[in-house]
Amino acid sequence: MSSKLIRAVKSRWDKSSIIHQKALVIRFIEIYGSIHSKGDWLQYLATEFNLSDNGEAAPELDQVYH
């Protein structure tokens, strides 16, 4: 995972409400059972935030989070 993508994920996470963060954690645990590694968690968040490998979001979904 590139450092640019990690920064984008962390930025999205920081801008998310506590309620949204909690929902993401619960969904991850329901799917995978637990958080196995930081890399797994960050990749899951990148997918949920619809971020590409270069850290950019799809334009239509980018509006949802801003």
Image (cartoon, rainbow, N blue to C red):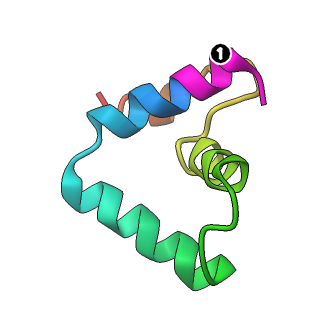
Q: Can residue 25 be seen in this snapshot?
A: yes
Q: Which region shows up in magenta?
A: 1-7
Q: Position of residue 42 (x, y in %)?
A: 62, 45
Q: Position of residue 37 (x, y in %)?
A: 69, 58
Task: Give the residue furthest to the front.
Answer: 37
Q: Secondary structure at mark 1?
A: helix
Task: Give the residue furthest to the left.
Answer: 18
User: Looking at numbered disc 1 in the image, what kind of residue is underneath it?
Assistant: Lys
22 to the left or right of 4: left
Report the residue at 60% width, 77% height from top. Answer: 34
4 to the left or right of 62: right
- The answer to whether residue 60 is magenta is no
| 24 relative to 15, above or below | below
Residue under circle 1? 4
Front residue (pair 12, 60): 12
Q: Can residue 65 be seen in this snapshot?
A: no
36 to the left or right of 20: right
Q: Position of residue 7 (x, y in %)?
A: 54, 21
Report the residue at 56% width, 51% height from top. Answer: 48
- The answer to whether residue 4 is magenta is yes
Report the residue at 21% width, 48% height from top. Answer: 17
| 57 relative to 37, above or below | above
- Quadrant showing the N terminus: top right
- Quadrant showing the C terminus: top left
How many numbered dots are placed on residues in this image? 1
| 33 relative to 42, above or below | below
Report the residue at 64% width, 50% height from top. Answer: 38
- How crowded pointer 1 is (Cα within 10 Å; few <14, some 14-19, many 20+) is rated as few
Magenta segment, principal secondary structure? helix
